[in-house]
Amino acid sequence: MLIDTSKIFDSIRINKKAAQERQTAALCEWPGCQNKGTHPAPKGRDNAREYWHFCINHEAQHLRHVSRSLYQQRAPDQSTTSLP
């Protein structure tokens, strides 16, 4: 049996047009950056299915900022706690 005529392999072939569309990446959405935006980052909790597209450097900066702001929201306010 030839692979080219198999019904199994026909169902798992990559659509060339879809593959080409995936290869063309948008530019990084960080202001002033001209690198390819190959790394998606979620826009927020309310927009879980929407993504910013950043280069690797700006994605790391964005994730650090998001992590830091989430930690500050969850951390207890140390100025109001008193020690015995």
Image (cartoon, helix red, strand yellow):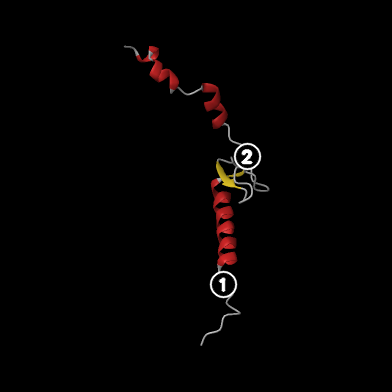
Q: Which is more N-terminal, label 2 or label 1?
A: 2
Q: Residue most toward the left?
A: 1
Q: Of 9 and 31, which appears nearest the observer?
A: 9
Residue at 60%, 62% (x, y): give it: 69
Q: Residue most toward the right?
A: 31
- Local secondary structure at mark 1: loop
Give the residue type at disc 2.
Leu
Q: Identify the mark at residue 76; answer none if there is no mark.
A: 1
Q: Would you say 3 lies left or right of 49 here?
A: left
Assess disc 2: are there few (<14), some (14-19) or many (≥20) residues with their C-alpha within 10 Å of its C-alpha.
Answer: some
Q: Position of residue 16 (x, y in %)?
A: 52, 22
Q: Is residue 44 above or below residue 26?
A: below
**Which of the two discs, 1 and 2, sits closer to the camera?**
1
Residue at 55%, 23% (x, y): give it: 17
Q: Quadrant of the N terminus?
A: top left
- Local secondary structure at mark 2: loop
Q: Of 14 and 34, which appears nearest the observer?
A: 14
Give the residue type at disc 1.
Pro
Residue to which mark 2 is pinned: 27
Q: How many numbered discs sit on the rendered protein? A: 2
Q: Is residue 24 above or below residue 69?
A: above
Q: Identify the mark at residue 61; answer none if there is no mark.
A: none
Q: Position of residue 82 (x, y in %)?
A: 56, 84
